[in-house]
Image (cartoon, rainbow, N blue to C red):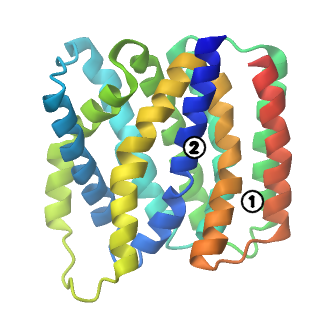
Amino acid sequence: MKASMAGWGSGLLGVVIFSGSLPATRVAVGGFSPLFLTSARAVIAALLGLALLWALRQKRPDRADLGSLAIVALGVVVGFPLLTALALQHITSAHSIVFIGLLPLCTAIFGVFRGGERPRAAFWLFSILGGLLVAGFALANSGSASLTGDLLMVAAILLCGLGYAEGAALSRRLGGWQVISWALLLSLPPMAAIALATLPAEWGGIGAGAWLGLAYVSVFSMLVGFVFWYRGLALGGIAAVGQLQLLQPFFGLALAGLLLGEEVAWSMIAVSALVVLCVAGAKRFG
């Protein structure tokens, strides 16, 4: 019970940190291309992770772990950041945040296949209900949004769920911050090459907001958040703690409205409130 509660607490802190990711990305793509932003944030976080691994003298992962680390890198280092950056060229961060409601269901499904978890039937009922609420919102608002942006967000969620589940299973042996640090280090060579190839032609026109957005997604979204998130998933269970991601729309919508001045429609708030009820049900039966 103590480990489970610690997992929920750590996971919640990770969700709070991740809540700023999409608003920060929305600001950052105003000054940087999606490819440069994705690669630059990975390079910065990888260098920080390398410093941590070296300072704390962590042993290298086994060769058998490299495949799992590659999946983590594909999902959360490359896939989710790139696809969301591309999506945010077509939709607002407030609209994109609602898609996060699909992430717990994806994480739970991949947790079954990659983490060996077997939640009860009632858990799936609440998890699927939360996913349907989000899907219904996206369809109802398709006329005022971008189909391209919505499809990119769905693809981003699928890859992110895979990366979460794979990383959480690996964290049980390697530790949460070690997993994301090694995954970042594994992706460093190609990400560094892409960053160099996509350097902005002009640096003078890049505003302070874009720089702050890059700093946030590099340090907090790409590294610090995962320290708490993977620890939470490993301690409390991938499927169960993963449902906390349903709370992220609340935090993210508040940030999008307060910091970016984006319109937050009542329907977004209503959907977010309903999926929060699904968190309570999923937690009970997770």
Quadrant hosting residue 71: top left
Q: Is residue 147 above or below residue 156?
A: below
Residue 222 image offset from top left, x and y in percent: 37, 47
Label 2 CA crowd tier, 10 Å (few <14, some 14–19, many 20+): many
Disc 2 from disc 1: Cα separation: 22 Å
Q: Amino acid at mark 1?
A: Ala
Q: Which residue is mark 2?
A: 15
Work out which quarter of the rendered image holds the N terminus and state it.
Answer: top right
Q: Amino acid at mark 2?
A: Val
* Labelled pair 2, 1 in contact (Cβ < 8 Å): no
- Looking at the image, which residue is at 85% across and 20% down? 122
- Looking at the image, which residue is at 76% across and 74% down? 143
Residue 37 image offset from top left, x and y in percent: 32, 63
Residue 270 image offset from top left, x and y in percent: 86, 58
Label 1 CA crowd tier, 10 Å (few <14, some 14–19, many 20+): many
Residue farthest to the front? Answer: 2
Work out which quarter of the rendered image holds the C terminus and state it.
Answer: top right
Q: Which residue is mark 1?
A: 138
Q: Is residue 21 above or below residue 223?
A: below
Between 224 and 42, the residue placed more toward the observer is 224
The image shows a total of numbered marks equal to 2
- Looking at the image, which residue is at 45% across and 49% down? 80
Q: Secondary structure at mark 1?
A: helix
Q: Earlier in the sequence, mark 2 or mark 1?
A: 2
Horizontal side, residue 222 vs residue 132: left or right = left
Quadrant hosting residue 132: top right
